[in-house]
Amino acid sequence: MKKVYLLLPVFAVQFAFAQNSQRYYSGTFFNEKKKPQNFLKIFNKNSGVYELTDEKGYAIIAAKEYNTLVWNNGKNIEVVRWVYELKYLLENQVPRETVKDINSKDYESLLEKPLIDKFSIEHSYDSLRKNSDRQFSAVRKLKLKSGSLYKIKSQPKKSLVFNGSFSTSVDIKNRNRIPQTQSRYVQGRSENGSLIWKGPDTGEMFSFGPDISTLGFNGQPYEYDVNGQLVDLSNAVSPAKAYNNNIFKTTVGYSNQLNINAMIKSDGYNEDARISFSLGQRKDQMYFIDQFDVTNSFKTKFSTKILDFNFNAGFNYEENKATNTNRIGLFNRAYQNSLLTPVSFSNQQNAYLSNGLQRSYSLYADNPEFLFKQENKYNYYENIRQFNFDISKNWDDFKLNISQAYDNQDIMHRDIYKPSTNGFINGLYNRRDQKNEFYNSNILTSYEFGDNDFKNKFSLNYILNDRKVSVNHSLDRNYMYQRTSQDYIFNYNLDYDDYDDVEFGVNVGNSFYISNTSLKNAYWLPKANGYFTFKNLFNKYGSKFQLFGAYTQLATEPEMAKSYSSYTTTQFSAQNSYQYFPLKEVETFKNLSNVDIKEWKTGFKFMLNGKIDLSAEYFNRRISDDIFPIFEGQNLVLKNFADHTYKGFEVNLNYDRIIANQNFSLGSKASFFKYRDVVDRVNSGYNNLMISGFNDIYKTLSEGQVLGGIMGSYFERNTEGKIVIDDYGYPVKASGMKLIADPTPDFVMKFSHNITYKMFALDISWEWKKGGQTWNGTQAVLDYYGRSQTSADERNIKNYVFEGVNYNGNVNQIPVDFYNPNQSISDNRWTRYGFLGVAENYVEKADYIRINDITLSAYFNVGNFKKALGISFYVNNIFLWQANSGVDSDQNFYDFDNSRGLDFFNLPSFKTYGCTVSFKF
C-alpha cells in the first residue's frame, strides 16, 4: 500500500463525485510482536474486502459498525465500533496548526490568577465521591479519627459469593392411540343357531354373543353385576348398557430442582474454591390407575486448587420408589385384560367376590383393578450412592489427571400375584434383590509439543474397572458375578493449521483389554483416524470442506448389571404368556470370548458462511462372536453365537441463522439416517435362534437375514405364489414358520427448527420413519376373541370368496360366511386358525410421522440479573400418524430391549403437556 498522503488528491476527487454513503475505519495495526508493520493484510470478515497497512502500520478499510476485522492470519480480531466518511479520515491525516496570539509578559501577568494550594489544610474539605478514584471499590471503611486524620480499611482480598437456581415443572400425561375395540356384541357364543350371552361365571372368554341392544338386566341379585344378569330385552327391567373398561387416566406429575453454589474468590474474580449442592424431587405419574414413581436426589461437589493441583470431589445420592415396575409384564397383563374384557362386564364395580377371590369376566382372565391392588405402597426401591474424586496438574506441556469413582446400588423388586390370579391360582410372591458395586480408576497422562502450526500430543490412559453384582431371588437362588478389567490406551495426535488454506490432523493408537472373565485377552486393538480441511473456499472467509476417515477396533463384554431373565418369554407360547414369571438369571459371565468390533467410517463436512453445515458419513461395523442368551435345560446361559455387520450412512444439514437480525432469528436442522444389520454367520446348530418373543412368534438370529427378523406362521402358496384355499373355502395355514417381517426402516429423517424473537424462543422437533414392518399380535388376539372393531364390522359378512386357488390349481369359487351361528365358534373367520391366527396376515407397515417436541420459552430480566426468570411451555408426542392399526410402532415388546417389531399388547406411548419455571439468583 502506498503512503496515504500520496493518495490524498485521488481520494479527494473520488469523494467529490461519490454519491454513496460508504464509511470507513482507520487505525494502526500491529504484528504478532506488538509492533507496527507495513503490508499487514487487514481482512473484513463481513464484506470480504481487505487492505494493506503502510510503513507505519496505518490502514483505512471500508467497514460498518460491528464488522469484524482480522489480521496476523486470524490471530488478531477487532470488532469495529466507530466508522466515518472518508473525507473526515483524510482531513485528519493532514496536521493542522493554529495561529498563536502574540502577547507581552506584562499583558500575560495581568491575565494570570494567583495560585491556590487546594491540598492545604486551610482549604481541605470532608468529601469523598464514588468516582474519586478507580480503586475506590477497594476501600471498605473510611473513618475520621481526629482533625484531618483519617483511617482507611481496605476490602478483604477474599470474598464469599453465593448464587444458584431453582426450577419447578408440572406434567400432564395422557396416552396415545390404542387399538379399536367393539362396544356392540356381548360375552357369549352361538349355540344351536342362536347367539347366547354367557356370563362370567361360565368361564366364557369370547365376545361372539348377541347384540347388546337386544338385551337387558333382570334386576336380580348377581355377584358379577349390580344390575343383574342379561336376559332378552322383552323380559328385562332395564336395558343393558355397554361398560367402559378403560384403565388409562389423565395424570399430573411434578418435579423440583434447587441448585446452590458457594465460591471463595480472591481479588474479586479468581476462584479459590467452590462447593455446590443440588436437591431434586420428582413424581412421575403413569397413565394407569394409581401407578407412579418418586425420585429424591442430593448431589454435592467440591473443587479447589492447592499447590497448583486441581482437586474435585463429589457425592451423589438418589432414591427411587415405584408402586410397581413392568419387570414381570404386569402392565402388559393389565392392559391386555382391559382390552379383552367384554362390553357387558364392568371391571370397576368391584375387584373381589364375596369369597375374597378376584372378580373378573372369566375364570381364565384377570381384572386390572385386582392386579393393581396391593398392600405395599411401593414394590420397587432403588438407592444409588456415588463417590468420585479427581486430581490434575499441568507442568507446561505435560499433564496428569487421576480420577477415582465408586458406585454402590441397591435395587429391590417385589413381584406379587395374589391368589386367584390367572395362571397363579395359589398366588406367587418373589423378592428380587440386586446389589451393584462398581469401582473405576482412571489415570491419564499426556505430553504436547510443537508450535502454533504443528501440534503433537502423546497420551497414555490406564483404566481399571472392578464390578461386583449380587442377585438374589427369594423363589430361586443367589447369583454372584465379579469382573476386573483393565484398559491400556496409547494415543498419538498430530494437528496442522496454516490459518489460511489447509488444516489436517491424524490420530493413531492401540489398546490392550485384559479381563478375568474373558477367555482371551486382547493386545491388538488399533485405531486410526484423520481429516483434511480446505479453508476459505471461493474466497469466502470461514468456508471449509473437510474429508475424514476412521478405523477402530474394540473388544467388549456383556454388561453384568443387566438382567437377561426377560428371555424367559421364549419358553412360552403367546396363548400361555399369562404363565410368564422371570426367575432365572444368567449362570455366569465367565468363559466367554470378547465381542470383537471392527468399524470404519468415512465422510465429509462442508461449511459455508458460518451458516450452512452439510455433513455425510458412511459407516461399516463388523461384530464378531456376538453374545446372546439361551436356555440349556433349566439354566439361562450366554454364548458366543454369531457374526453380523451393521452398516449404513447418515446425512446432516444445519442451516443456522436463515433469517437473523437483532430481534429475530430462524434456524433449522435436518438429518437422514439409513442402516441395515445382517447376520453373516451363526454357529452350527443355532441357526434361527430365538432372541426375543414367544416360541410361536419371535425375532430370530438367521444366517443371511437381517438381525431380528420376525419368524411366524404363514399361508400356504403354490409354485406361482398364489394362496391355496381348502375345501371349506378358507386359505390354508402352512405348517412350520418362516421369516415374515423385517422391522428395519428404509430410512429415518429428523428435523428441528428454532425461532427466536426478542426474549421468546420456539423449538420444534419432528421425525419421519419410512418403511419397516411390525407384527400386530394385539389385533390378532382381539380378532380371535371377537373384541376387535374389525370382527364386529365383518362378522355378518356372508358368501365371501377368498382369492386363491384350490389344491388342483383351479381358482377358488367357494363362498363362506365369516360367522355362521349354525357352525361351531371354532369355525368362524377369526378363531379357525388359533390364538394368533396366521401371523403373516397381521404384518403391517411401521411408517410414522411424529412431532416429538414443541417448546415455547421466554426469559426475563429481573433487577440486575439478565434472563434470570425463565418460563417454558412444552408438549411431547402431541401428534402421531402411523400406518399400522396398533400402538406406536416404536414401543417395545414387554418393554424389553431389542424387541421392536413385535406388538403383543405393547403399552401405548403417551402425550405430555408441561410447564417449567426457572429462576436464577
Image (spheres, rainbow, N blue to C red):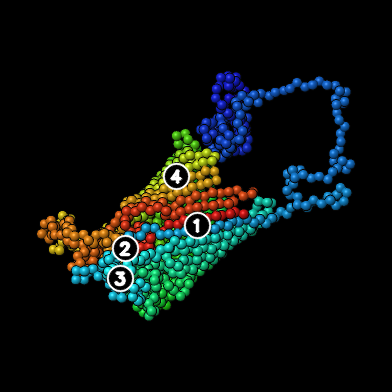
Amino acid on which the number 2 mark rests in the picture:
Ser
- Alpha-carbon neighbours of circle 2 within 10 Å: few (<14), some, or many (≥20)? some
Sequence order check: which comes first, mark 3 or mark 2?
Answer: 2
Residue 711 at x, y percent in the picture = 27, 62
What residue is pinned by disc 3? 236
Amino acid on which the number 4 mark rests in the picture:
Ser
Res 767 visible: yes
- Alpha-carbon neighbours of circle 4 within 10 Å: few (<14), some, or many (≥20)? some
Residue 563 at x, y percent in the picture = 40, 68
Point out which mark residue 71 bears.
none
Separation of residues labelled 4 and 1 (CA atoms): 40 Å
Name the residue rendered at 46%, 51% in the picture. Answer: 854
Name the residue rendered at 19%, 65% in the picture. Answer: 820
| Label 3 close to label 4 by CB (< 8 Å) | no
What residue is pinned by disc 2? 183
- In the displayed structure, 829 sits above or below 660; it is below
In this view, the residue in front, 842 or 581, is 842
Separation of residues labelled 1 and 2 (CA atoms): 68 Å
- Alpha-carbon neighbours of circle 1 within 10 Å: few (<14), some, or many (≥20)? some
Separation of residues labelled 1 and 3 (CA atoms): 86 Å
Sequence order check: which comes first, mark 1 or mark 3?
Answer: 3
Amino acid on which the number 3 mark rests in the picture:
Ala
Amino acid on which the number 1 mark rests in the picture:
Leu
